[in-house]
Image: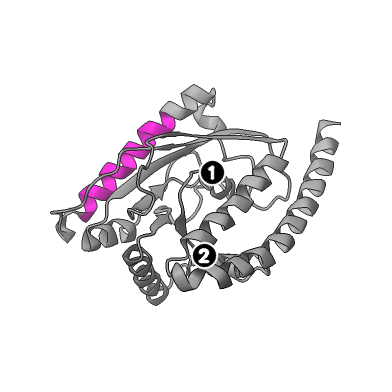
Amino acid sequence: MARLAQYIGSAILWLLYSILVIVWTPFLALLFVFTVPFDPGRYTVGLWFRRAAIVAVWMNPFWRFRTSGVRITDPRRPYIAVSNHESYADIFLISHLPWEMKWMSKQEIFNIPFMGWMMRLAGDIPVRRGEARSRAASLREVRDRLSKRVSVMIMPEGTRSKTSELLPFRDGAFRVAIETGTPILPMAVAGTRHCMAKGSFLFGRANAEVRVLEPIETAGMTLQDVGALRDRVRDLIIRTRAELQQELGIGAQGQ
């Protein structure tokens, strides 16, 4: 019976989400037309795009999401935000943070009608996995967003881990942070792993949280420091995620 309720609830949610995306797209396009001439970083458009994710979570009775940690007092000071990656639901969770960040996401998502169109309107950054040329172009786009005083969100694992262990972090986010003198803003996510299972359209229950950690300044660092910075941030996220799991009552295997 519980499984049947999950199937029915998930089908209803997908219908509601489809309507939400179709309605939100023209609204975002109008916002783009009226704000971009005065807002080249597309901060306003992006902020309202993330609010669609907040509405989606509000519609979902299976999910309970919250944020905690450091409060960002100047939303237009750019950061390179990095987080572990548990599931697609991470995007919905992190979108609850009250400032705008451009997301680096795989090209395939940009090809989805309506969703991809909104991502392009918002100024998010596509990247093709396994293509060095595409990754280099994406990092140029990251520098462009930072120069327009907008933070960028990068998940340095590159993809979701198939186990509870974090994958190795790639260097790109840390390299560009050092090259541009941009602080790293670490975040830890816990509780989303099973609420959008890979290969399934069903929504699972989730009590999840993202915790924002103290920014790490990169001023004075050189490219020789990339590896140490990467490992420091990864270890910090691992420790914080473990703390969150304990607070949320999630065992390591449950993640």
Residue 229 belongs to magenta span:
yes
Quadrant showing the N terminus: top right
In the rendered image, residue 224, in percent from the top left (x then y), is placed at: 15, 57
Residue 241 belongs to magenta span:
yes
Q: Which residues are magenta?
A: 226-242
Do we see residue 179 in this rendering?
yes
Residue 235 numbered tag? none
Q: Residue at x 42, y 52 (%)?
A: 157
Among the two numbered marks 1 and 2 on one chain, the one whose residue lies closer to the N terminus:
1
Tell me if 181 is positioned left or right of 107 in this view.
Answer: left
Element carrying mark 2: strand
In the rendered image, residue 151, in percent from the top left (x then y), is placed at: 38, 56
Residue 227 vs 65, above or below: the answer is below
In terms of depth relative to the viewer, which is nearer, 213 or 228?
213
As drawn, the residue found furthest toward the bottom would be 133
Instruction: Give the main secondary structure, helix, strand or loop, of the magenta stretch.
Output: helix
Do we see residue 108 in this rendering?
no
Residue 96 numbered tag? 1
In the rendered image, residue 69, in percent from the top left (x then y), is placed at: 40, 33
Residue 106 numbered tag? 2
In the rendered image, residue 42, in percent from the top left (x then y), is placed at: 47, 65
Quadrant hosting residue 131: bottom left
Q: Residue at x 34, y 56 (%)?
A: 170
Residue 231 vs 126, above or below: the answer is above
Amino acid under disc 2: Lys
Real-space Cα distance between discs 1 and 2?
Answer: 21 Å
Q: Residue at x 54, y 34 (%)?
A: 66
Residue 163 vs 112, above or below: the answer is above
Foreground: disc 1 or disc 2 = 1
